[in-house]
Amino acid sequence: MEDISLKNFSFKSFMLNKANFQTHPYHLVTISPWPLILSWSLLCLTTTAVLWFHNRGGILVLGSFLTFNFLIYLWLRDVSWEGTYGGDHTHAVQKGLNLGVVLFIVSEAFFFLSIFWAFFHSALSPTVELGSTWPPYGIEPLNPISVPIFNTVLLLSSGAFVTFAHHSLIDKERYNTLLGLAWTVLLALAFTALQGIEYWEAPFNISDSVYGSTFFFSTGFHGLHVLLGTAFLSVGLWRIFTYII
């Protein structure tokens, strides 16, 4: 029987055979179940999160989050195979991926710009409906020299560690890459936990005037980005940890 293990896998011969029937450098993706399944997982995660906000379904939130992470791992596993062994991430495809990431970051920047615009529009010139004062009458703001500033330190520290891990990965320093990513994930989880505590102890809610709406809208979407980033980095950490040299 022919041995088809990766040990005897010839990437060069694979690419030569592939070039016989593909006359362009672009990647025509195959049918994948992960986009549909992952979308369903996100729906379950948001639904259970709403139940958790009403003091129900705490274990369901944890299960949905772990399922979401596992599905991301399976999807990224296929993407990694396509790029590493399938030869699908050609120079033209990589340029497209880079452009897609740049456009995504630009769209996110404008998204948060609109949120900050709403906050400063109300804060710098409070209307009569807000009592011509900021914060609006009856709103007790959070003390910035407590959990918010500590969370800021955690977030900046996690950014420093992931930058350290990135440069270590470029230099092929596996131990430092694992160390940097591990600290990044731990700090991100601590940030998310503290933000949840901050939400729990906040003396106002999302329906309390413009102040509550802009606060929970901005910090909530930022927390969602942190959760997604934590999931992606956790997958990367696991792949590097299980990689056999």
Image: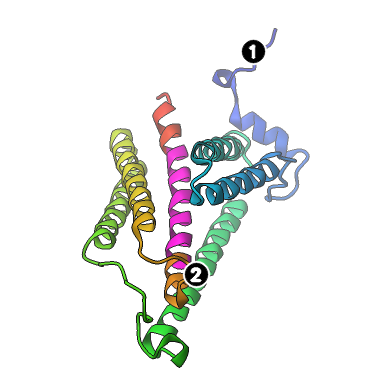
Disc 1 packing (10 Å; few <14; some 14–19; many ≥20): few
The answer to which of 126 and 190 lies nearer the viewer is: 126
* Residue 207: image tag: 2
Tell me if residue 89 can be seen.
Answer: no
Q: Is residue 118 above or below residue 21?
A: below
Q: Which residue is at a point 52% across and 39% down the rendered structure image?
A: 69
Q: Which residue is at a point 53% across and 59% down the rendered structure image?
A: 101
Residue 104, image quadrant: bottom right
The answer to which of 134 and 118 lies nearer the viewer is: 134
Extreme-right residue of the structure? 21
The answer to which of 205 and 153 lies nearer the viewer is: 205
Where residue 61 sits: x, y (%)? 52, 41
Report if residue 219 lies within the magenta region: yes
Predominant SS along the magenta part? helix
Q: Secondary structure at mark 2?
A: loop
Residue type, numbered disc 2: Ser
Residue linked to disc 1: 3
Where residue 211 sits: x, y (%)? 42, 75
Q: For the magenta stretch, what is the residue range?
A: 217-236
Which of the image's four quarters has the N terminus? top right
State yes or no: discs 2 and 1 in contact (Cβ < 8 Å). no
